[in-house]
Amino acid sequence: MTSRSALVSLALLAGLGTFTTLPAAASATCPNEAVRPVVQTEASMSQSILCLVNEERAAAGIGTVYSNPQLEAAALVHSRDMVSEGFFAHTSPEGIDFVQRISDTGYTRGASSWLAGENLAWGSGLLSTPAQIVLGWMKSPPHRANLLNGQFREIGIAAVRGTPQAVPVVDGVTVTSEYGYRGPKKANGAKKAKKRMAAALRKRSARRR
């Protein structure tokens, strides 16, 4: 039976705007980590957040997560929807949750098992930099648990300008990060049949000897 599970991140739905501003790390190595969204591209923000996530994982002795285009697609859809529709939640007003968003990209197709998780964040002004987004996650136990989960191997991050408020803030950002792991591909029916036939032939050959 296929094993499937999903880690539901308990996002603080008030957003990062409620966190106290934290100082940036002294040994900053990720590009643009202290740069606000009004003066950098969405792509560069996403890359900076990925770099910071992997810095935190490395500091905890946990393996790197690598960008996956399917997870990125799922994240981008959700970030854009939250800003344009003015909501901040794992489940959209249409009832689509992150597991369905990820599955719809084909990410889980053919996998013998899979694991998924999602962290959300939004911030404005001084709290809209990549460093503040990641530091906010690290201060929240459920977000930290996803970020430092050693089972996850892949990630998709989408930082979109604007906030999920009734009146979006221009100097703000909304971020979705989708975490994933896929087990080995399931053998198709033909391969399984060939293996069974080969095993039967080996048994017959052994009996004749």
Image (cartoon, helix red, strand yellow):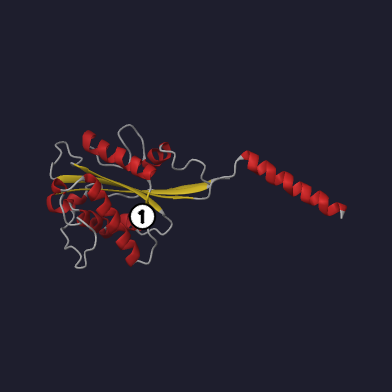
* Residue 57 is at least partly visible in this image: yes
Tag 1 residue? 146
* Mark 1: amino acid: Asn
Please state which of residues 33 and 108 is positioned toward the viewer in this rendering.
33
- Other-residue count near label 1 (Cα within 10 Å), few / some / many at <14 / 14–19 / ≥20: many
- Outermost residue toward the top? 94
Which picture quadrant has residue 192? top right
> Residue 93 location, x and y as percent?
30, 33
Secondary structure under tag 1 reads: helix
Please tell me which residue is depicted at 33% across the width and 55% down the height of the picture. Answer: 142
Task: State left or right for residue 149 relative to residue 32.
Answer: right
Residue at 82 percent across and 51 percent down: it is 205
**Could you tell me if residue 7 is visible in this image?**
no
> Which x, y percent locates residue 159?
25, 45
* Viewport quadrant of the C terminus: bottom right
Quarter of the rendering occupied by the N terminus? top right
**Position in image of residue 189 (x %, y %):** 63, 39
Image position of 11 (left or right of 164): right
* Image height of 190 relative to 181, above or below: above
x 34%, y 56%: residue: 147
Q: Is residue 165 left or right of residue 181?
A: left
Residue found at the very far right of the displayed protein: 208
Residue found 18% across the figure and 62% down from its top: 24
Instruction: Name the one closer to the observer, 23 or 76.
Output: 76
- Between 112 and 209, the one nearer to me in the picture: 209
Q: Position of residue 154 (x, y in %)?
A: 39, 51
**Tag count:** 1
